[in-house]
Amino acid sequence: MNFSSKLLEDAVDAFASLPGIGRKTALRLALHLVNQETEQTETFTEALVKMRKHIQHCQICHNLSDESTCVICADRRRDRSVICVVEGIRDVMAIEDTQQFRGLYHVLGGIISPIEGVGPNDLEIDSLIHRVQQDEVRELIMAISPSIEGDTTIFFITKKLKELQVDVQVSTIARGVSFGGELEYADELTLGRSIVSRVPYSKE
Amino acid sequence: MNFSSKLLEDAVDAFASLPGIGRKTALRLALHLVNQETEQTETFTEALVKMRKHIQHCQICHNLSDESTCVICADRRRDRSVICVVEGIRDVMAIEDTQQFRGLYHVLGGIISPIEGVGPNDLEIDSLIHRVQQDEVRELIMAISPSIEGDTTIFFITKKLKELQVDVQVSTIARGVSFGGELEYADELTLGRSIVSRVPYSKE
């Protein structure tokens, strides 16, 4: 790309440094800002800088938060005896959007992956064990991806709980053919496992 | 989307205000910034604010520029007798990338479009006429989209030049089947016109 303006080129480089933004898209975004009032660019950038400077990880569940304790952990109406363990904050948002879960969360910050150099100490596993030991936690729901890494992570956590003789029920979220999903379009693994893990028919 | 952080929500709203960025992409971008150092967000936003505050339109050709005269207009080695008339600055960049044109440009800032409320006075047409009258311009190359609006714009400019009895050659860029393009995939209009506007075969 031939730029007649170094300022524009720098702005395009800035946008293109974001993941999934190519240089053509970056140019479109930069020209959009040029066509708007200066205040709009200032409002835009201030929101980002403010977020980056002041956002914290909740000291209890490690979810992103404005305060040292996030709104979910601070909500006294939620069931504190059930903790849903997830990889990242996007999972928290997805589960919250369902409005089906009223317990608390624990964000691991990833899953154990030797290939990517992520070991148990890089994740919030110790703090999870500590939480379960300290608080009266009845159940841990593992909402973690069903990959080798995910399974390893679940195995590691349950093994550690057993070693420390922590009495807590561990469950995983149900996997199977999605509601409304046509059988012929389900992938083989999901369909196969959904037959193996069939559930008794209930009339409710 | 359920946000546990207002700061994050504001950042996502900011990204989603850009054209072509949905809320899922906006969330991905905002979380990317959270996972980087604070300085990275500052460098990113500073490039945008600096660009927006200091970028100018070249006083001669209305291309975006760091100075009051853009690098193309300031380049004394370029042929000042040929002006390529384009809709926007992206067209300038596309033509510059070809390295086939060594004249100057004139950015209209759009084309005449009654439906979108763009009249001749909203565009840099008067300044173009003025340039042609003032400087020794031999040829105007109209590199404008071949739509009704584009044709109207070209017609308006040539009519005005004739009224003012300005002696300048007006040409348009060649349209036809692209080099390497298969005939069967060319659209009907392009293929039809390319037959009507056939050129004599040269052995060069």
Image (cartoon, coloured by chain):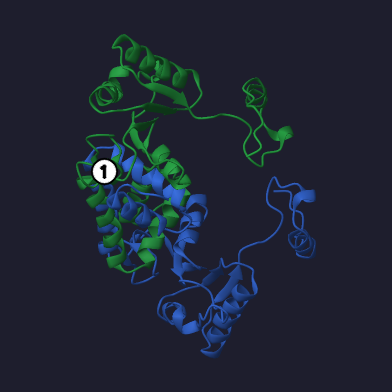
Chain colours: A blue, B green
Instruction: Give me the chain letter of mark 1.
Output: B
Of all residues shown, which one is farthest toward the front?
B203
Q: Helix, strand or loop at disc 1? A: loop
User: Is B180 on the left or on the right of A43, as rendered?
Assistant: right
Along the line of sight, which residue is nearer the eye, B119 or B28?
Answer: B119
Along the line of sight, which residue is nearer the eye, B17 or B202?
Answer: B202
Q: Which quadrant of the figure has residue B198?
A: top right
Where is B57 relative to B150, above or below? below
Percent of width and height locating residue B142? 43, 27
The answer to whether residue A66 of the structure is visible from this angle is no
Which residue is depicted at the point 74% across and 49% down? A203
Of all residues shown, which one is farthest toward the top?
B163
Which residue is depicted at the point 38% across and 27% down? B139
The answer to whether residue B30 of the structure is visible from this angle is yes
Along the line of sight, which residue is nearer the eye, A138 or A2?
Answer: A2
Percent of width and height locating residue A181? 71, 47
User: Is B175 on the left or on the right of B107, as rendered?
Assistant: right
Where is B113 relative to A143, above or below? above
Q: Judge the density around disc 1: few (<14), some (14-19), many (≥20) Cα neighbours within 10 Å.
A: many
Percent of width and height locating residue A80? 43, 66
Which residue is depicted at the point 73% across and 60% down? A190
Count the marks.
Answer: 1
Q: Quadrant of the C terminus of chain B?
A: top right
Which residue is depicted at the point 27% across and 51% down? A7
* Residue on which the image places disc 1: B70
Where is B107 relative to A188, above or below? above
Percent of width and height locating residue B184? 74, 33
Q: Which quadrant of the figure has residue B28?
A: bottom left
Identify residue type, mark 1: Cys
